[in-house]
Image (cartoon, coloured by chain):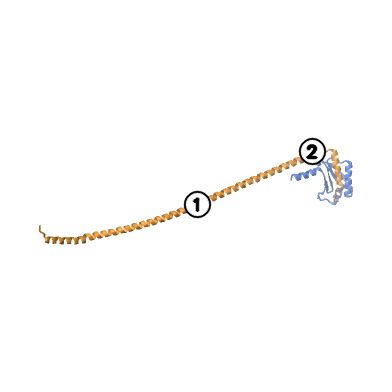
Chain colours: A orange, B blue
Amino acid sequence: MQINFVQILFQIINFTILLVLLRKYLYRPILKILEQRARKIHEGLEAAEKSIQEREKLEMEKKKILVGAEKTASEILEGARIRSKKIEKDLTEKSQKEEEARAKRAQERTRSQLKQMEKELNRRFASTVIDTTETLLSDSLGTAQHREILDNQIARLKKIKFSS
Amino acid sequence: MNASNTNKPVSAADGEAQAETALVVTAIPLSKTQSHQISEVLKEKFGREVKLENRVDKSVIAGMYIRVGDQIIDSTLRLKLDKLRERLLP
């Protein structure tokens, strides 16, 4: 087997030309595309990183807001509970006072009615006693007793001073 | 036994005429002795003769009511009961 140096040389030249052409028309655009892609990937990654950070930040804010909202809700609920307790207490006290006042009024009314009834009873009793006394005296006094009464009064008449 | 003025306006002439007559209201008629005794007492008190007019009225119950001019002496049981009624039944 004989080595053809000329052929080898031509092949080396061809290969070199191919390399130069490939480098110029294939590798460079591909590298450019790769660089662009790498840059885009990098930018995407950065954007993703930024997005993640933003999301975390938002999550934290959300948590913060939720905690704040929970605290506010809890305070509102506690306030409402206290207010409702106070209202309930006030209403109970008011109702109790009204009930007491009503009972007192009823008691006073009953007492007044009793007093009135007692007064009326006494009045009727006194009236009956006086009427009975009057009737008894009218019926029971005889002439002798009338005369005795008149004699006594005549005797006392002498002691009375008249303004003449 | 009460002596009181009626506060009725009486002229001097009327007073003179009424002072001579005493109205005595009783539940039974006065006896002559009682009439005499009353006349004597009134004569002594007023310093002149007093004529008695005895009116019988059962409503006085007991005792006597005397009116001489504008002066009244009411010692009837009726008055006492009326006063008692006023006190007990206001």
Q: Amino acid at mark 1?
A: Glu
Q: Nearer the viewer, mark 2 or mark 1?
A: 1
Residue B8 placement (x, y as % from top left): 81, 50
Sequence order check, earlier mark of 2 and 1: 1
Using the image as rendered, state which of residue A4 and residue A19 is in the foreground.
A4
Q: Is residue B84 above or below residue A19?
A: above
Residue A120 placement (x, y as % from top left): 71, 42
Name the residue rendered at 51%, 50% in the picture.
Answer: A81
Q: Which residue is mark 2?
A: A136
Using the image as rendered, state which of residue A68 and residue B39 is in the foreground.
A68
Quadrant of the image containing the N terminus of chain A: bottom left
Q: Chain of mark 2?
A: A
Left or right of A117 in this view: B53: right
Contact (Cβ within 8 Å) of mark 2 with mark 1: no
Name the residue rendered at 21%, 61% in the picture.
Answer: A23
Residue furthest toward the front? Answer: A1
Q: Chain of mark 1?
A: A
Q: Which residue is mark 1?
A: A78
Using the image as rendered, state which of residue B12 and residue A42 is in the foreground.
A42
Name the residue rendered at 62%, 45% in the picture.
Answer: A103
Using the image as rendered, state which of residue A59 and residue A113 is in the foreground.
A59
Left or right of A3 in this view: A25: right
Circle 2: is it few (<14), some (14-19), or many (20+) Cα within 10 Å? few
Q: Amino acid at mark 2?
A: Leu
**Disc 2/disc 1 C-alpha distance (Å):** 84 Å
Residue A108 placement (x, y as % from top left): 65, 46
